[in-house]
């Protein structure tokens, strides 16, 4: 007990103070001017809004989704809003070959890559889980595995630019929610994988940031349709959400929490987990990281 009071408790207080009150660099729209940015799932909702926000900031914007016709409209509007350039490549993230080839084509069109924003998901409905293994597999492949494939393919370019990976997730990837078990599983997987990779990058001095975006209920058409008659909620605006995601990526934050509740970041930020991760890393043999 004396050890806890003398050493561990002060250390814990200092950690909490740093976690909650450490000053972040102020965001400026010019941070994105001329940057080469990919946004997946950009034909509607938050992805579409992010494309428009980036265009206003003068970024080079590359968008992808399944609908070629919708993407053409998004690209046209991006150019109207002032994008340095705007391109699209249509395809489905159910096809891992497409996901990998998309990154190569996008990098060639833009001449590199500064930020990869992973936002797409497969269609999700709210139902009790009834042993639909195929649906679980599809959710994991599209919502998780394709994110891994895309980030791996993009890493060489991101290393060259000291760039950023922005992973759009959900509160369903932090807490249990009924009726969306396959979706929730894929979002928990994103946290586990990309948080682990972030630690590896830090230890091995890879200057590529990873930002996990934990979103609550947002007023996209898809979300509102999915929860209709099932969940009562106060959705947050998608345009503000899109801007917060971009800000977090530009500022290279580890996590950002966004919805209409001021308690979300406080309750789910979990400094205890960060502290335990810090302590856990101290037990590793660093030669394992150096030799690999």
Image (spheres, rainbow, N blue to C red):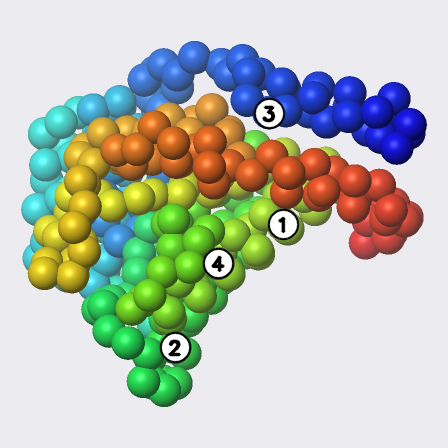
Label 3: how many residues lie within 10 Å, few (<14), some (14-19) or many (20+)? some
Residue at (32%, 85%) from the top-left corner? Answer: 130
Mark 3 in CB contact with mark 2 (< 8 angstroms): no
Pointer 1 or 2: first along the chain: 2
For label 2, the residue is 136
Numbered badge on residue 19: 3
Determine whether, in the image, residue 172 is placed left or right of residue 127.
right
Residue 3 in view of the camera: yes
Give the alpha-carbon distance from disc 4 to disc 3, as whole Å: 22 Å
Which residue is at the front of the view, 157 or 230?
230
Label 2: how many residues lie within 10 Å, few (<14), some (14-19) or many (20+)? some
Mark 1 in CB contact with mark 4 (< 8 angstroms): no
Q: Is residue 4 above or below residue 73?
A: above
Helix, strand or loop at mark 4: helix
Give the alpha-carbon distance from disc 4 to disc 2, as whole Å: 13 Å
Residue at (85%, 30%) from the top-left corner? Answer: 4
Mark 4 in CB contact with mark 3 (< 8 angstroms): no
Pointer 3 or 2: first along the chain: 3
Q: Is residue 87 above or below residue 146?
A: above
Helix, strand or loop at mark 1: helix
Residue at (43%, 64%) from the top-left corner? Answer: 186
Label 4: how many residues lie within 10 Å, few (<14), some (14-19) or many (20+)? some
Which residue is at the front of the view, 42 or 124?
124
């Amino acid at each position: 007990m004396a050890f806890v009071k003398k050493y561990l408790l002060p250390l814990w207080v200092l950690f909490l103070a740093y976690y909650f009150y450490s000053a972040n660099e102020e965001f400026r729209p010019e941070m994105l001017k001329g940057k080469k940015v990919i946004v997946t799932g950009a034909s509607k909702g938050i992805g579409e809004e992010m494309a428009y926000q980036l265009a206003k900031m003068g970024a080079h914007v590359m968008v992808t989704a399944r609908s070629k016709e919708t993407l053409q409209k998004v690209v046209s509007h991006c150019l109207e809003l002032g994008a340095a350039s705007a391109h699209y490549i249509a395809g489905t993230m159910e096809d891992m070959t497409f996901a990998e080839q998309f990154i190569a084509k996008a990098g060639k069109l833009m001449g590199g890559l500064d930020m990869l924003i992973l936002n797409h998901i497969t269609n999700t409905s709210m139902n009790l889980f009834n042993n639909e293994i195929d649906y679980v597999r599809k959710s994991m492949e599209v919502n998780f595995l394709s994110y891994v494939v895309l980030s791996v393919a993009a890493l060489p370019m991101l290393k060259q630019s000291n760039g950023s990976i922005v992973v759009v997730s959900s509160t369903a990837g932090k807490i249990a929610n009924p009726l969306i078990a396959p979706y929730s599983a894929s979002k928990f997987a994103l946290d586990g994988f990309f948080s682990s990779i972030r630690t590896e990058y830090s230890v091995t001095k890879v200057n590529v940031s990873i930002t996990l975006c934990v979103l609550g209920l947002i007023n996209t058409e898809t979300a509102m349709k999915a929860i209709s008659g099932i969940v009562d909620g106060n959705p947050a605006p998608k345009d503000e959400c899109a801007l917060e995601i971009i800000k977090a990526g530009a500022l290279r934050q580890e996590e950002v929490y966004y919805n209409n509740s001021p308690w979300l970041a406080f309750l789910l930020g979990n400094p205890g987990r960060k502290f335990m991760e810090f302590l856990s890393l101290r037990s590793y043999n660093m030669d394992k990281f150096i030799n690999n």
